[in-house]
Image (cartoon, helix red, strand yellow):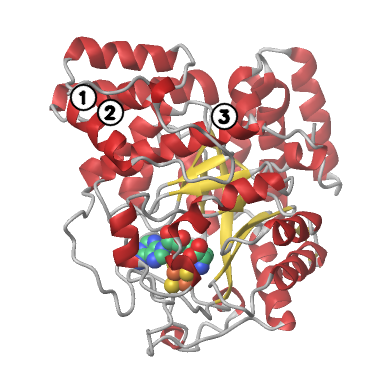
């Protein structure tokens, strides 16, 4: 069967569903990889072009180890060529786990009577933000269950509270949210509170699987969730993150559907997503699904490399759901952001360690419980450049990731200097002595590699000002 060229597919009309399952299945069924085709697709990506669904399907169907090695090498080259060694760090902060939905994979589902329900009070919220600041965090994502308690007004107020918490030199400079979808008015409300990215995962783009996993509550409406980012865009939020929960349906289907979602946003709003997330299902309290579509480590690492090649100018977020080993591998394929020092139990950042943490049932299990300092230390060992930069968001440079990718010299002018300045702040305020030593070495190395005496001296001058007590210097 011949598949339809992209121009004949479902039209992209804003606020309308845009996933055509048969089309995606057909593209997967018709993709026949060989070495020549795989190389041609990789080269297209390395020339800084986004891949279409057919090309991406060729990579997804290429399971021969030699071809997989080419794909992974392609992703590594793209990462090195375009983005360099910067990795942006953030932490999730779970604000409340009341939930009226029944997502079968999630520990917060309404029917889970073992879950202890909790919403942080304002004082607890402040204590948790202070604790995060005391470790050096600058970027948070606030996470909420879906419940009438967590209205747009409540979330906006929470965001404002977080921005207002300052502890010594600590402050949160960017607050993103991962929350149930709002109507357009609700999106306007959270935008006014100054959110960075609004993130929402479709979980699965496969409609029958979606229906099976979301049997009741607001989230059972596939189309309402699918069009959430359309409403966000209509409300003026052009910094959005999408994602799929891998393990519910065929991972190849989800990757192509994610791409379809990117196409849709670009076609309707002229701007793609800021980030894509690819959480993989973890065990959770009262977990209730079989593992028919479980994604192995081999498939997972491969699919991240393929995503990198398919959307070379979109940020990729990798979370502590994955183990240190898997994280270390896929970092090299071009993930741009990772969480660090993550705790999912509600209120746990500010908690007395002697309190039984099992009292605070988390949403799912994480596999990387290293502290922020431990992760920074290891990143430095691998010559990565940990960054807490929030400059573009605060300077109003929207479409940041796209600019990094497409504007010549952008990374050199803004991203690397800002990464160095935020790392210098971290070292001065929070790093352990041995991490500090490694950190200064990496800063020196990067300053030398700038190959531009004027920029180098501008950054050096600001680093000296940081050492003398100034903070929040950025380009
Ligand atoms: N309640 C909101 C929602 O469903 O969109 C917000 C956040 S939910 C707490 C965050 C994400 O965690 C979900 O979108 C889902 O992808 C992911 N998640 C849920 N259960 C999971 C599990 N067992 N393993 C890994 N990720 C899971
Ligand atoms: Fe609730 Fe979100 Fe968990 Fe679903 S994934 S049960 S909506 S918290």
Judge from the rendering whether residue 435 lies leftward or rightward of residue 185; answer left or right: left
- Residue at label 3? 267
Q: Secondary structure at mark 2?
A: helix
Whether 282 is drawn above or below 196: the answer is: below
Look at 75% across and 13% down and name the residue there: 453
Between disc 3 and disc 1, whose residue precedes?
Answer: 1
Judge from the rendering whether residue 199 lies leftward or rightward of residue 280; answer left or right: right
Q: Is residue 342 visible?
A: no
Q: Secondary structure at mark 3?
A: helix
Q: Is residue 415 visible?
A: yes
Badge 3 local density, few (<14 within 10 Å), some, or many (20+)? some
Q: Are marks 1 and 2 in contact (CB under 8 Å)?
A: yes
Q: Report the number of numbered marks.
A: 3
Residue 175: image quadrant is: bottom right
Between disc 1 and disc 2, whose residue precedes?
Answer: 1
Look at 56% across and 48% down and name the residue there: 435
Whether 447 is drawn above or below 99: the answer is: above
Q: Where residue 414 appears, x then y in whole percent?
A: 72, 27
The residues bearing labels 1 and 2 have C-alpha atoms spaced at a distance of 6 Å
Whether 314 is drawn above or below 449: the answer is: below
Badge 1 local density, few (<14 within 10 Å), some, or many (20+)? some
Q: Secondary structure at mark 1?
A: loop
The residues bearing labels 3 and 1 have C-alpha atoms spaced at a distance of 24 Å
- Residue at label 1? 31
- Residue at label 2? 57
Q: Nearer the viewer, residue 458 or 228?
A: 228
């Amino acid at each position: 069967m011949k598949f339809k060229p992209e121009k004949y597919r479902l039209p992209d009309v804003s606020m309308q569903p845009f996933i055509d399952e048969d089309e995606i299945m057909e593209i997967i069924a018709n993709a026949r990889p060989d070495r020549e085709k795989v190389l041609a697709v990789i080269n297209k990506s390395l020339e800084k072009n986004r891949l279409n669904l057919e090309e991406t399907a060729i990579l997804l169907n290429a399971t021969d180890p030699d071809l997989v090695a080419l794909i992974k090498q392609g992703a590594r080259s793209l990462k090195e060529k375009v983005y360099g060694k910067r990795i942006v760090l953030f932490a999730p902060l779970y604000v409340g786990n009341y939930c009226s939905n029944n997502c079968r994979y999630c520990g917060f589902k309404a029917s889970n009577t073992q879950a202890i329900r909790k919403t942080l009070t304002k004082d607890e919220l402040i204590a948790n933000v202070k604790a995060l600041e005391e470790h050096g965090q600058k970027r948070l994502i606030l996470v909420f269950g879906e419940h009438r308690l967590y209205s747009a007004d409540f979330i906006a107020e929470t965001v404002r509270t977080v921005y207002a918490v300052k502890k010594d030199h600590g402050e949160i400079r960017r607050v993103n949210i991962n929350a149930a979808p709002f109507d357009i008015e609700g999106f306007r409300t959270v935008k006014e509170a100054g959110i960075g990215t609004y993130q929402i995962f479709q979980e699965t783009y496969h409609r029958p699987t979606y229906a099976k996993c979301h049997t009741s509550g607001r989230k059972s409406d596939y189309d309402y969730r699918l069009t959430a980012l359309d409403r966000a865009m209509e409300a003026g939020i052009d910094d959005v993150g999408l994602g799929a929960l891998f393990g519910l349906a065929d991972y190849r289907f989800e990757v192509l559907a994610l791409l379809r979602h990117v196409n849709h946003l670009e076609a309707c709003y002229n701007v793609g997503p800021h980030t894509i997330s690819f959480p993989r299902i973890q065990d959770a309290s009262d977990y209730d699904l079989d593992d028919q579509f479980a994604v192995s480590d081999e498939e997972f690492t491969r699919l991240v490399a393929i995503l990198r090649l398919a959307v070379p100018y979109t940020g990729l977020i990798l979370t502590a759901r994955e183990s240190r080993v898997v994280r270390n591998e896929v970092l090299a394929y071009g993930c741009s952001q990772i969480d660090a020092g993550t705790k999912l139990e509600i209120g746990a950042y500010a908690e007395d360690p002697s309190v039984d943490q099992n009292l605070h049932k988390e949403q799912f299990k994480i596999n990387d419980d290293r502290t922020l300092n431990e992760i920074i230390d290891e990143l430095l060992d691998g010559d990565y450049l940990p960054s807490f930069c929030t400059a573009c968001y605060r300077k109003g440079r929207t479409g940041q990731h796209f600019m990094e990718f497409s504007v010549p010299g952008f990374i050199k002018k803004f991203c690397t200097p800002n990464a160095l300045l935020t790392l210098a702040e971290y070292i001065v305020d929070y790093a352990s002595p041995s991490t500090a030593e490694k950190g200064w070495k990496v800063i020196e190395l990067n300053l030398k590699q700038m190959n531009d005496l004027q920029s180098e001296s501008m950054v050096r001058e600001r680093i000296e000002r940081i050492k003398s007590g100034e903070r929040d210097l950025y380009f």
